[in-house]
Amino acid sequence: MFDPGEVRDILIGSARQRMPLTYSALLAVLGHAFTRPLMRQLCKVLDRIDEDGRAAGEPGLAVLVVRQSDGLPGQGWFAARSTVHDDLPPDWEGPQARAYTEARQAEAFDYWKTA
């Protein structure tokens, strides 16, 4: 349903602007209203984009897609990273999760500003 290349291009543009996107905003850019089933499909594409980027030595892009309520990625983003990274905060909400998220976003912002 979602073209990983299109989603990746949108996220690279977001990184170059140093602007995270909410799940709803990304779905809207892709021509869809927010629904939980669409969000789940989108999250699978985001995971694939990060897996491919990791293999290419790039920082993650999925971290740029956040909840409107608190500006953090969803719990699934943290869970997907737990199999690859051992530096995760103990919880997916709160100040440690925010600091971790902001650090990963900064990596993407810095990488894509010149790439």
Image (cartoon, rainbow, N blue to C red):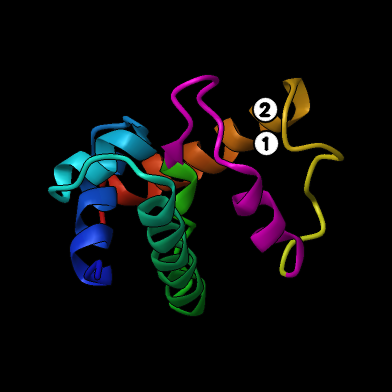
Residue at label 1? 100
Label 2 to label 1, Cα distance in Å?
Answer: 4 Å
The quadrant the C terminus occupies is: bottom left
Looking at the image, which residue sits at the far right?
A: 90
In this rendering, position of residue 67 left or right of residue 27: right
Number of numbered discs overlaid on the protein picture: 2
Between residues 6 and 68, which one lies in front from this camera angle?
68
Q: Which amino acid, by three-letter code, is at mark 1?
A: Tyr
Where in the figure is residue 19, as x and y percent of width and height? Answer: 32, 30
Q: Do the residues labelled 2 and 1 touch (CB within 8 Å)?
A: yes
- The residue positioned 36% from the left and 44% from the top of the image is 35
**Residue 81 is covered by the magenta coloring:** yes
Q: Which residue is drawn at 44% across and 47% down?
A: 36
Q: Give the range drawn in magenta.
A: 65-83
**Three-letter amino acid code at the position of disc 2:** Ala
Q: Relative to 63, is 8 above or below?
A: below
Dot 2 falls on a residue whose secondary structure is helix
The residue to which callout 2 is attached is 99
Q: Quadrant of the image for the N terminus?
A: bottom left
Crowding at mark 2 (Cα within 10 Å: few <14, some 14-19, many 20+): few
Magenta residue check for 3: no
Mark 1 Cα-neighbour bin, 10 Å: few <14, some 14–19, many ≥20: some
| Residue 7: x %, y % from top left | 25, 59
Give the residue displayed 71% in from the left and 56% down from the top. Answer: 79
Identify whether 96 is placed above or below 57: above
Q: In which quarter of the image is residue 72?
A: top right
In the rendered structure, find residue 90 and report the number of the disc placed on it: none
List x then y, in percent, for residue 90: 87, 40
Going 32% across and 35% down the picture, which residue do you hit? 24
Q: Where is residue 61 in the image (x, y as percent from the top left)?
A: 42, 53
- Please tell me whether mark 1 sits on a helix, a strand or a loop: helix
Residue 25 lies left or right of residue 56; in this view the side is left
